[in-house]
Image (cartoon, rainbow, N blue to C red):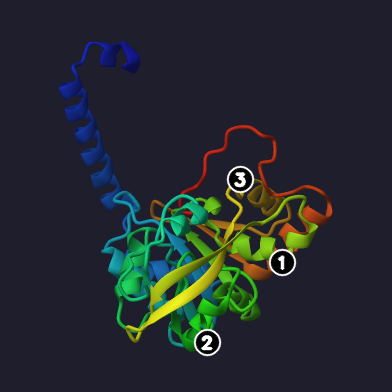
Amino acid sequence: MSRGLIAKYLSAKQKRVLKSKFNEVRNKLVRTLFRYDAVKLKLRLTQIGITATDSLMVHANFGPDSGFRGTPLDLVNALVDLVGAKGNLLMVSLPFRGAAYDYLALGKRFNVKKTISMMGLVTEMFRRREGTLRSLHPTHPVLAFGKDAQWLVAEHDRCLYPCGPGSPFDKFRQLKGKILFFDVSFGAITFFHYVEDLLKDRLPFPVYDDRLFSVTAVDSKGEIRMIQSYAFNKEIPRGAQKLEAEMLLRGKLLKGRIGNSQLMLVTAEDVVACQTAMVEAGNYPYDLSGGKHERDENYE
């Protein structure tokens, strides 16, 4: 009898019980067969090309079936141990889901020390970790730890364009940074915004909305600040699938695994070069077909 026919004769309660049992068995198998710890993770990351002197921007998801033996904070500590002494560890800590324009329109006060990150538990644990700095920007604050952390987060509040010139994303590129995707899709790449800012005069649509927002913020000293910022044009369906495919085609996207976790690694410079080449060729890395587009909530 097929699974579909079996399901047809089960009650909703029986389905829930079976699903729970299935997940329990699957997670047990993962913990047994695909288990790895922080030491093995650091070794694997070194094998795929990350060095102790790198500036590493990480997009990460922490799931029960990854195989990692430890907590989200243990994962953060492993990454800090890898690059935090001689290099820099960065994560993006957006305080919203959805579109930046809609978030800014709410008029919420941003507190650089207290406003939580909505980009997953790993980023929130990194935000709370002693020694982590956070840039003062209401939509695209960046977390940083390492030798250049102070410089990386400095004066983000003066950037009218959140990922543009003078932002941590701009400085990250200057440091020839690398971007690691840990159990997340390539669509999580916030650095995409930095490149589209570079190319904004060559794109057939406005990258930003015309409205200039003024936002109340609380800085690290507890002082009230007014920050001005433009929001990205939310009518443009951003998704990095086309960029991912192009980078794979050019051999600029490295994929790997450890345990049950998927890893991807790119350099900031390769992202800039590939995205620029696509725009110059008229192969815009956007879904401009007019069809329905599913927004990656961790993307913007």
- Residue 84 in percent (x, y) is at 43, 82
Residue situated in front as seen by the camera: 179 or 219 = 219
Circle 3 sits on which residue?
A: 235
Q: Secondary structure at mark 1?
A: helix
Task: Measure how far apart labels 3 and 1 are at the Cα level.
Answer: 19 Å
Horizontal side, residue 107 vs residue 163: left or right: left
Considering the image in quadrants, where does the N terminus appear? Answer: top left
Circles 1 and 2 in contact, beta carbons < 8 Å: no
Task: Measure how far apart labels 1 and 2 are at the Cα level.
Answer: 21 Å
Residue flagged by tag 1: what amino acid is it? Answer: Leu
In the rendered image, which quarter is residue 127 located in?
bottom left
Q: Is residue 85 visible?
A: yes
Task: Measure how far apart labels 2 and 3 are at the Cα level.
Answer: 33 Å
Residue at screen point 20% across, 35% down: 20
Residue at screen point 55% across, 68% down: 229
- Give the number of the mark in front: 3 or 1: 3
- In the displayed structure, 85 sits above or below 116; it is below
Circle 1 sits on which residue?
A: 198
- In the displayed structure, 147 sits above or below 79; it is below
Circle 2 sits on which residue?
A: 151
Residue flagged by tag 2: what amino acid is it? Answer: Trp
Horizontal side, residue 165 vs residue 216: left or right: right
